[in-house]
Amino acid sequence: MSPIASVESAAIGAAARARTAAVPLAELNPADPQGFVDDTVGYVFERLRREDPVHRSHSPIPGIDTYWSVTRYRDIMQVDTSHGVYSSEDGITLMDFRRTEVADVHRHGSSQA
């Protein structure tokens, strides 16, 4: 990477980190697809690990309501190994793929790509 590209990349990262810092913590959504599109989701998790390591998020997906984001390794391991305390009975996805596929079929007329 050239020195100019490196400086530009650092500036883009600093701007993304500043945007993430400006969002009220209660509105921070680690599942926001845009964070994955522009590769800035890491800043969201960085902030959550620092300020709210077990964060309750509100999903914009109908039927999902709220979900918990556990962001620190030790906490993740506690949840993962304590089956009697924590449950994934309702699933671990933030999408209802059946509903999404049905919407695609209605919108495009076929489930084939």
Image: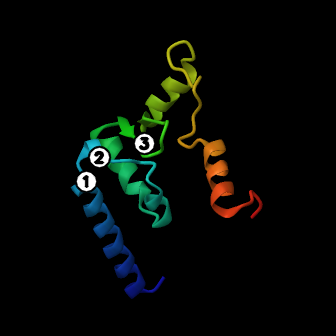
In this rendering, position of residue 64 left or right of residue 90: left
Q: Is residue 104 above or below residue 5?
A: above
Question: Which mark identifies residue 23?
Answer: 1
Secondary structure beneath label 1: loop
Estimate the spatial distance between the alpha carbons at disc 3 and disc 2, rounded to whole Å.
Answer: 10 Å
- The residue where tag 2 is placed is 27
**Looking at numbered disc 1 in the image, what kind of residue is underneath it?**
Val
In the foreground, 76 or 3: 76
Q: Quadrant of the C terminus?
A: bottom right
Badge 1 vs badge 2, beta-carbon distance below 8 Å? yes
Give the class, few, some or many, for how many residues have Cα within 10 Å of label 2's Cα (few <14, many ≥20).
few
In the foreground, 40 or 95: 95
Residue at 34% x, 73% y is: 12
Among the 4 quarters of the image, the one containing residue 109: bottom right
Estimate the spatial distance between the alpha carbons at disc 1 and disc 3, rounded to whole Å.
Answer: 16 Å
Question: Which mark identifies residue 60?
Answer: none
Q: Residue furthest right?
A: 112
Give the class, few, some or many, for how many residues have Cα within 10 Å of label 1's Cα (few <14, many ≥20).
few
**Looking at numbered disc 2 in the image, what kind of residue is underneath it?**
Glu
- The residue where tag 3 is placed is 59
- Residue 42's x, y, as percent? 42, 55
- Residue 45's x, y, as percent? 39, 48
Residue at 54% x, 18% y is: 82
Q: Is residue 37 above or below residue 111?
A: below
Secondary structure beneath label 2: helix
**Looking at numbered disc 3 in the image, what kind of residue is underneath it?**
Ser
Q: Is residue 9 above or below residue 107?
A: below
